[in-house]
Amino acid sequence: MSSAGIEIPESELEFTAIRAQGAGGQNVNKVSNAVQLRFDAPRSRALPESCKERLRQMRDHRILADGVIVIKAQQFRSQEQNKAAAVERLHELLSRALTVRKKRKPTKPSRAAHARRLDAKSRHGKLKRSRRVVDE
């Protein structure tokens, strides 16, 4: 499997056939069509360290605490199609981890924006003061 120029050997992917959830009649109880893919990212030799670090920082329910990626595919009736769907989802996850995000440049509001904000605050305060009950 290749993901954005990185080749992941088939030996590092572990597939398990499991029973799919949900409706399906009697067939769902006897056929294991769903596929669970496990990929041990921290121990993979195919991924660069920067990608492994970004995977650790990602907030994704498919990435376990130890860094192992678990993807479950059960949308198709065919085990082969579910296997291909799981590999495709792993490909998408890894390509997101491979992209380096641009560093944010801190900015500050312009002088005019600052003045507009303070002006709006004073107008709102005057409006609230005008609604007060006057004590005589």
Image (tube, grey):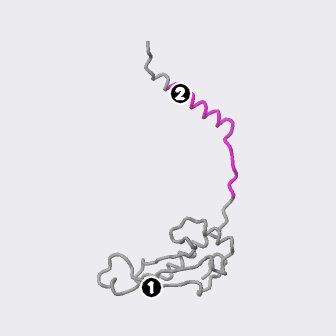
The residue shown at (49%, 78%) is 85
- Secondary structure type for disc 1: strand
Task: Confirm or deny contact between disc 2 and disc 1 (CB under 8 A).
Answer: no
In the displayed image of the protein, which residue is found farthest to the top?
136
For the N terminus, the quadrant is bottom right
Taking depth in this image into account, of 90 and 133 the one nearest to the observer is: 133
Residue 47 screen position, x and y as percent: 66, 77
Q: Is residue 13 magenta?
A: no
Which amino acid type corresponds to the residue marked 2 in the rendered image? Gly
Taking depth in this image into account, of 92 and 29 the one nearest to the observer is: 29
Relative height, residue 134 to residue 2 (above, below) = above
The residue shown at (63%, 79%) is 43
Residue 99 screen position, x and y as percent: 65, 67
User: How dense is the environment of label 1, judged by Cα within 10 Å: few (below 14), some, or many (20 and up)?
Assistant: some
Q: Main secondary structure of the magenta part?
A: helix
On the rendered structure, is 32 left or right of 129?
left
Q: CA distance from mark 2 to mark 1?
A: 66 Å
- Kindly identify which numbered label has been placed on residue 125: 2
Relative height, residue 19 to residue 67 (above, below) = below
On the rendered structure, is 71 left or right of 28?
right
Total marks shown come to 2
On the rendered structure, is 29 left or right of 58?
left
Q: Which residues are magenta?
A: 103-127
| Residue, disc 1 | 17
For the C terminus, the quadrant is top left
Which amino acid type corresponds to the residue marked 1 in the rendered image? Ala
The residue shown at (59%, 87%) is 11
Q: Earlier in the sequence, mark 2 or mark 1?
A: 1
